[in-house]
Image: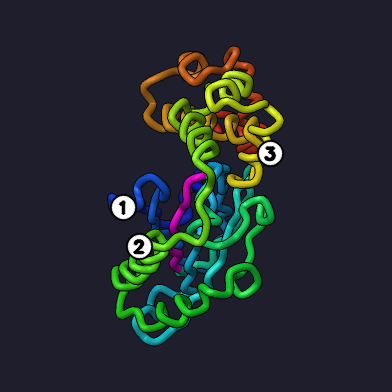
């Protein structure tokens, strides 16, 4: 899950080396306070192939006063969603790379695709973390508790994807989705049908869709950098042409490529 429109302050934080192959980012989002008479500014959340655990404090000013946050698991998304963040709220998150939700969260990303569900309903083991986070003295302390939790979970994962699927997911990510499914299947030595089943089970989305999302995210990086025009971005990221690129962005993000930057 990644945000496209700024309705507050979003930052990504360093990932410990031991988690770097499994965790895409630790992140923090502080929603802007709403001014009197202003209308809500919706936040566009873009698909990235990842699964997130999100810790939400309803009021930043209450952190350190025993306020218990709410923890939610957000599964991989097939396209964008619009949300209305509560003014003044704070979210901490850990964004897990495709294939690592079952290992580190104990949940099936396939069952959570396009869903946002409280841990009490999908991962009750995290209720203990929810209570510990109520003791956080500050936002950095809450982040430290979150990192410690996942360092422990990484040392004793609940499940590990098979080596073949891990390799296939690594190939997809390192190529930013530019591998064809036939070539990827040959690379890992399975049929396309088996490849589809394995990645769907471990990543929560079908490999073709994951490839589209990864390619879109690569294009988004180029768009934000502003060093290439649209036709060059399309060529660099493996789209047939600029029109193809624009159609894909509209399908996944709900706006045109230039609209993502406005």
x and y percent of residue 223 in the render? 45, 28
Give the answer, above or below, for where 144 lies relative to 175. below
Residue visible at 58% across and 57% down? 74
Q: Would residue 107 appear left or right of 232 to someone viewing this image? A: right
- Is residue 92 rendered magenta in the image? yes
Mark positioned earlier in the residue sequence (1 or 3): 1
Q: Which residues are magenta?
A: 90-98
Does the residue at mark 2 contact the one at mark 3 (Cβ under 8 Å)? no
Q: Nearer the viewer, residue 88 or 20?
A: 20
Residue annotated with mark 2:
151
Mark 1 is surrounded, within 10 Å at the Cα level, by few (under 14), some (14 to 19) or many (20 or more) other residues, namely: few
**What whole-number distance in Å separates the C-alpha atoms at marks 2 and 1?**
8 Å
Residue annotated with mark 1:
18
Does the residue at mark 2 contact the one at mark 1 (Cβ under 8 Å)? yes
Residue annotated with mark 3:
197
Give the answer, above or below, for where 222 lies relative to 262. above
């Amino acid at each position: 899950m990644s945000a496209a429109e700024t309705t507050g302050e979003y930052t990504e934080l360093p990932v410990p080396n031991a988690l770097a192959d499994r965790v895409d980012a630790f992140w923090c989002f502080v929603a802007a306070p709403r001014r009197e008479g202003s209308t809500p500014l919706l936040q566009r959340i873009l698909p990235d192939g990842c699964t997130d655990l999100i810790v939400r404090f309803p009021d930043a000013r209450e952190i350190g006063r025993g306020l218990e946050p709410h923890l939610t698991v957000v599964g991989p998304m097939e396209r964008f969603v619009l949300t209305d963040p509560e003014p003044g709220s704070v979210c901490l998150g850990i964004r897990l790379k495709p294939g690592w939700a079952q290992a580190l969260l104990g949940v099936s990303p396939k069952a959570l695709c396009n869903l946002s569900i409280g841990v009490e309903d999908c991962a009750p083991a995290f209720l203990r973390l929810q209570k510990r986070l109520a003791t956080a003295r500050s936002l950095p302390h809450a982040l430290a508790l979150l990192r410690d939790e996942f360092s422990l979970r990484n040392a004793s994962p609940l499940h590990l994807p098979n080596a073949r699927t891990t390799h296939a997911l690594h190939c997809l990510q390192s190529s930013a989705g530019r591998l064809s499914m036939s070539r990827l299947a040959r690379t890992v030595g399975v049929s396309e049908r088996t490849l589809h089943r394995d990645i769907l089970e471990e990543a929560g989305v079908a490999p073709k869709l994951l490839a589209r999302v990864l390619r879109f995210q690569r294009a988004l990086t180029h768009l934000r950098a502003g060093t290439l025009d649209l036709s060059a971005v399309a060529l660099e990221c493996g789209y047939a042409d600029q029109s193809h690129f624009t159609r894909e962005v509209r399908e996944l993000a709900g706006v045109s490529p230039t609209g993502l930057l406005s």
